[in-house]
Image: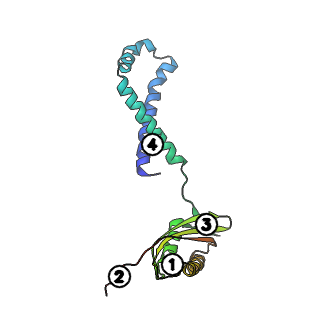
Amino acid sequence: MRPFDRVLLFIYTFILTVLFLAALPIVAGWLHVDQIQPQLLHAIQQPGVIFLLLGIFIIAGIRLLWANVKPTREQAVVYESKMGNVHIALTAIESLAEKVVSQSSGVREVKARVFNRPQGIGIRIKAAVTPDISIPEVSDTLQEQVKERVLAVTGITVQQVEFLVHSISAGKPRVE
């Protein structure tokens, strides 16, 4: 959960707790509604403020619900040892794949995403290429290189490497 969501959750929970504590004497019968009726009538006469507060509270509740429901990125288990499990963050595998692909001439603007597969992982690579390369040849070579390099470094089997060329453009000329 992000820091903003944590602060929002704290404020949301604090306000709910205060409201429930204020309602406790009424529900328990220690305080009658007749005794607090003038304050309630005064608060009800300000509907704009009440609607504003209710709107903010509902929006905060929806935001917190979304923050807890949205899927989180998992880590990949490499192996189990006597000392415990070894995990590698998916972002580390993504950066490894990006490094392998970006070292190839004619390939630029590389972005990789890792996703889970039944017997390993899959990697989706999105890149821009220059028009002087053969996309089928380069993609086949890069798919194999990424698969081998990820296996060698992490021990994780790569089941699938998808290669998406999102742009074919001339590379920037180098100044030597």
Mark pair 4, 1: CA separation: 41 Å
Within 10 Å of disc 3 (Cα), the crowding (few <14, some 14-19, many 20+) is some
Within 10 Å of disc 1 (Cα), the crowding (few <14, some 14-19, many 20+) is some
Relative to 72, does residue 77 appear above or below in the rendering? below
Considering depth in this image, is 130 or 112 the residue closer to the camera? 130
Drawn side of residue 134 relative to residue 80, left or right: left
Residue type beneath disc 2: Pro
Relative to 85, does residue 45 appear above or below in the rendering? above
Q: Secondary structure at mark 3?
A: strand
Tell whether label 4 touches label 3 (CB within 8 Å). no
The residue that mark 4 highlights is: 9
The residue that mark 1 highlights is: 100
Looking at marks 1 and 3 on the same chain, the residue that comes earlier in the sequence is marked by 3
At x 47%, y 51%, the residue is 1
Disc number lying in front (1 or 3): 1
At x 36%, y 21%, the residue is 43
Looking at marks 4 and 1 on the same chain, the residue that comes earlier in the sequence is marked by 4
Disc number lying in front (1 or 2): 2
Residue 95 coordinates in the image, percent (x, y): 49, 71
Residue 109 coordinates in the image, percent (x, y): 44, 72
Considering depth in this image, is 66 or 133 the residue closer to the camera? 133
Tell whether label 4 touches label 2 (CB within 8 Å). no
| Residue 33 visible, this orientation | yes
Residue type beneath disc 1: Val
Mark pair 3, 4: CA separation: 31 Å
At x 62%, y 67%, the residue is 121
| Residue 83 visible, this orientation | no
Marker disc for residue 77: 3
Locate the C terminus by quadrant: bottom left
Residue 40 coordinates in the image, percent (x, y): 39, 18
